[in-house]
Image (cartoon, helix red, strand yellow):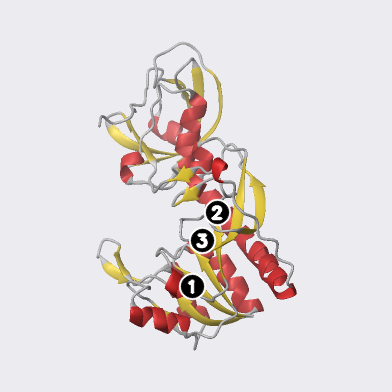
Amino acid sequence: MRVVFLGSGAFGLPTLSHLARTHRITGVVTQPDRPAGRGVKLSPTPVAAWADAHLPGVPVFKPERINTSGDLETVRALDADVWVVIAFGQKLSKALLKDRFAINLHASLLPRWRGAAPINAAILAGDARTGNSVITLAERMDAGLVLGTSERAIEPAVTAGELHDLLAADGPELVENVLRAQACGTLNPLVQDESLVTLAPKLSRADAWVDFSQPAEECRRRINGLSPWPGVTVEFRGQPLKLLRAGPSRDAGPGAVGDIIDPAQGIVRCGGGTGLALLEVQPAGKRPTLWRDFANGHRLGPEERLGGGKPAC
């Protein structure tokens, strides 16, 4: 098939790479270069960088607003049988999509977790399973017809960053199955059940906290669901400490909320007498490290604690 790929984030790279090997990419549409890094240097999106390196001769468009007349006409003029949209970052108008077969890969089992942060939301909510959905484009966000899904379990210690990469790697096979069904005329679009819709709003740095007065299971979900970004930061010996990964909760011994009751195992006392097992942390200005190495390096004593809590509004 002739494919126009619309995407910006790294989530779409495995699928773009697959499509480049198995189909003909006739154009790539992505977000404009943005300032990044300490030098605030203009940097291309991951999709633009990959296309420049691997798709010589394929036009790469970077519209500031894709629905304006000039950019809209440029994209619609591209020769294609299908538009594949993955983490593009701009809403596509009816005028742009008119008479086009366009599909979107979304990182959740729709209608659960429509929105900007579905991977984080699934971990934060304690979902046992998640997956990908391929849908048609609709006026409302992520509300299109479901053309196919893939599923996988959410392991207790997996972080949002790791789950992002796992789901991204699942994308090529699912998208290929949908394209094959379209070519064979065997697609079976399913309407989403609106009564089951849940929303996954965009995260910000204001979400980078954990409240140890909550049960350990809730704290585990929050640490893993926000890792690596925006992350969860607490205070240790008057300095910020980023919590990158936590394991299953367990019973805790006596102590106050936030006390490190087992320094060797990284067990922190949480609400309801539960214990949270910290597995990986990152001190300020340092690289990520396993808890046992952090504990050995800091020679943790018997009365250490972590300061956390939800910031006041």
Helix, strand, or loop for circle 3? helix
Q: Is residue 37 visible?
A: yes
Identify the mark nearer the N-term, 3 or 2: 3
Q: Residue at x 42, y 68 (%)?
A: 93
Give whichever of 265, 50 is nearer the camera: 50
Residue 192 horizontal/vertical position (percent): 59, 51
Are the residues flagged by discs 1 and 2 in contact, CB closer than 8 Å?
no
Mark nearer the viewer, 3 or 1: 1
Quarter of the figure with residue 282: top left
Residue wearing tag 3: 11
Give, as a three-letter code, the residue at label 2: Ala
Give, as a three-letter code, the residue at label 1: Leu
Residue wearing tag 2: 107
Helix, strand, or loop for circle 2? loop
Q: Residue at x 40, y 28 (%)?
A: 299
Give, as a three-letter code, the residue at label 3: Phe
Residue 133 horizontal/vertical position (percent): 60, 56
Residue wearing tag 1: 97
Mark nearer the viewer, 3 or 2: 2
Mark nearer the viewer, 1 or 2: 1
Q: Residues within 10 Å of mark 3 (few under 14, many from 20)?
A: many
